[in-house]
Image: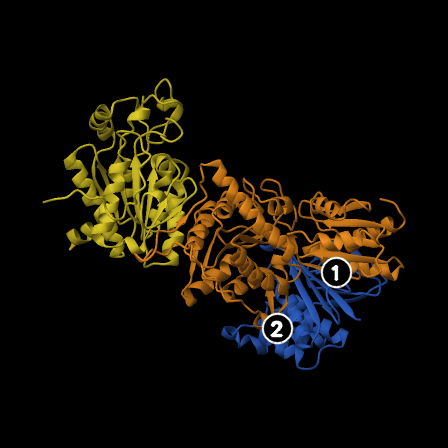
Amino acid sequence: MKTTQFLFSGFGGQGILFAGKFLAYKGLIEGKQVSWLPSYGPEMRGGTASCSVIVSDGAVGSPIVSKPDVLVAMNLPSLDRFESSVVPGGMIFADSTLIERRTARDDVKAFYVPATKLASDNGYPTLANMILLGKILAELGEFSGEGVEAALAKVISAKHADMKEVNLNALRLGAAQ
Amino acid sequence: MVVFQKPHALTDAPFHYCPGCTHGIIHRLVAEVIDELGIEGKTIGIAPVGCSVMAYNYFNCDMIEAAHGRAPAVATGVKRANPENIVFTYQGDGDLASIGMAETVHSAARNENITVIFINNAIYGMTGGQMAPTSLPGQVTQTSPYGRDVKACGYPIRVCEMLSELEGPEYLERVTVNSVPNIRKAKKAIRKAFQNQIEGKGFSLIEVISSCPTNWGMTPQAALKWIDDKMIPYYPLGVYKDRSAQKEEAK
Amino acid sequence: MSEKVLMKGNEAIAEAAIRAGCRHYFGYPITPQTEIAAYMAKKMPKIGGTFLQAESEIAAINMVYGVSSAGLRVMTSSSSPGVSLKGEGLSYLAGADLPALIVNVQRGGPGLGGIQPSQSDYFQATRGGGHGDYHMIVLAPASVQEMAELTVKGFELADQYRLTSMILADGTMGQMMEPVALDDLTVAPMPEKPWATTGTGMKRPHNIVNSLFLQPEELEKFNFERYERYAKIEANEARFEEYRMDDAEICVAAFGIAARVSKNAIDEARKQGVKAGLIRPITLWPFPKAPFRRAAEHVKAMISVELSMGQMIEDVRLASECRVPVSLCNRAGGMIPSPDQVLEAILGAAKGGN
């Protein structure tokens, strides 16, 4: 039974919860068991936001990710706080526009993507989250199939349907890094 | 020939009220209005906690006993559940103006389409004569044995005046029942408060200045006179808000 | 199986309530359950229902009392401090034998406490919460799907037995999203309510909804009758899930989020050669005594895993009749035990330590 535990962390407003929700929906559409759990409370406004996502072939036990297989750090405090919790052999994805340092861990695979810079250079400054997500999917070998587009359709409301293509572009841009 | 009859909206249960208490008169007025408007079959009454706690035994319509002070919230629920019902609360001064003040103010602010009959006798009757939120300055009660000291206990609350500052309520009137002419006026006010609800106009509250000879330590007659001498100067009778009339005037 | 959608637990409760026929919701904002109010505020006006943000928790529960008196399905929701305020109303609902659904998405206490998940209102929920002799049916969901299913069940049981049902969830269950299949929910028809105050129509004697009985003989009679009903509920409605209990030597007792954490620990313990299993009460009242009594015959020890200072552990000891040692594995104040902490407790108990 394969279970992948994701931890997304960053500032409030970086689309941490949205990225997690996309991934959970993708799992659901592809027939997996999934859970999504946000941090909640006043820290959601501007402080650190985090979000646990579990995608599994079997039933999900605790929805709390305390030992992520994949850590997505979108700011330095997130890397500082969570890098030691990543399981050996796990992966760290960091937004290198906002995080200057590298991880001290040598037992994990680390990927540094200047997601914030790429996002603003390409005209979608709010989609650094999706650029990182594109990279994650590519590295996990999951950037294929109908799941990606179908999940976008789920997490982007009909009112903002024009954003679907933009998000897809951001994902593709990330995957190409 | 006029034959004295009990209103149909009252049950045969004998009132438990003390001799000289005006609750009986007010119950009767409410019941007469229910009869005259032909609404008994769709009326739901909400009884309070206080002397009139067992009002549910006295009215023939469906009745609900509420927790202390919560009658307007219960009435809100009932009215929202079945808007075609006519819903009234019957509450004393401790119930309405002390423990239930938030429910009173907010149901008025929402202009809930209900009728509130508010009995103000400036004392807690059922528990044996303690100071009420409407007890007068200097009034001796079991819990203000040296007279209500406004420095320590604050001032009595004039409910109609206070609620009249709200945009919400439709109709606010203060009446009393210490004489035959006053009883007639009180009935007219109560009738209007029910009529307003039937017409969907919203929150109507009739404050009835009432007597409590037992806990005031007076004869019934002296108590009725005390209403004139002490209560009405502090709680002037009259209409405090009548939004429909105001609208008419504005035209 | 119908299409699954991702929903927050709080939203699943709200949607399930609407599907169960609830058209009246009263509440007051408090974290971490406000999504329920927000969902109702959005949906109710579109389906002819009532959403009302009450002036207080006290007013909200009394509005519930009013709608229930009128015979309709009604609910309110809150989190721990707000549920304390509702305590008065819960007692009156019980005294007047009124059905209603109350949701408590618990947070850490006492006092204003915090806003992170907790299970520390177990005593309050299972022992009544307000004054007087009474019980509520207390349902403890452990997934978003169960948040929906138990909401429907809560309404049904409340109507069937004329009492209040409470959904006792926590901040995690309320905030997490999981797939939920709403179209699989089935709702039993609402029973007749001849006692409701809907107007006599001049066709029947007046109905009185009341909890005041000044004659002690009369009040006692109603209490005894109510407890006969409670006995039926205890006999028929206790619900639980057993997980890997068949050959278990260590029995973990946990509900809600604690049960999910415990499952991870149990799987890991089994990998390490310790036969652990889980009894997960789904009804906290009535407490499922039978599986614990059975387990007490074959396990070496029991561990109550809780997000509190140890409340359910008392029921575990009572149900197992103290035949085996029962220890506590807990976090409190908004903290959640980790699977490692539970695993350590299991391994410790297997070695015979405490």
Q: Can you give x and y, in whole percent of width and height, for residue B2 in the image?
A: 12, 44
Mark 2 surroundings within 10 Å by alpha-carbon count, few (fewer than 14), some (14 through 19), many (20 or more): some
Q: Is residue A36 left or right of residue C58?
A: right
Chain letter tied to blue: A
The image quarter containing residue B220 is top left
The answer to whether B6 is drawn above or below residue A114 in the figure is above
Q: Can you give x and y, in whole percent of width and height, for residue C117 in the image?
A: 65, 51
Q: Nearer the viewer, residue B215 or B14?
A: B14
Residue identifier under label 2:
C4
The answer to whether B227 is drawn above or below residue B246 in the figure is above
Rendered-image quadrant of the N terminus of chain C: bottom right
Chain letter tied to orange: C
Residue at x 38%, y 40% (from the top left corner): B101
Q: Secondary structure at mark 2?
A: loop
Q: Of callouts 1 and 2, which one flags the residue occurring earlier in the amino acid sequence? A: 2
Numbered mark located on residue C242 in the image:
1
What count of labels does the image hold? 2
Q: Nearer the viewer, residue A147 or C97?
A: C97
Residue at x 82%, y 45% (from the top left corner): C325
Q: Amino acid at mark 2?
A: Lys
Chain letter tied to yellow: B
Can residue B239 be seen? yes
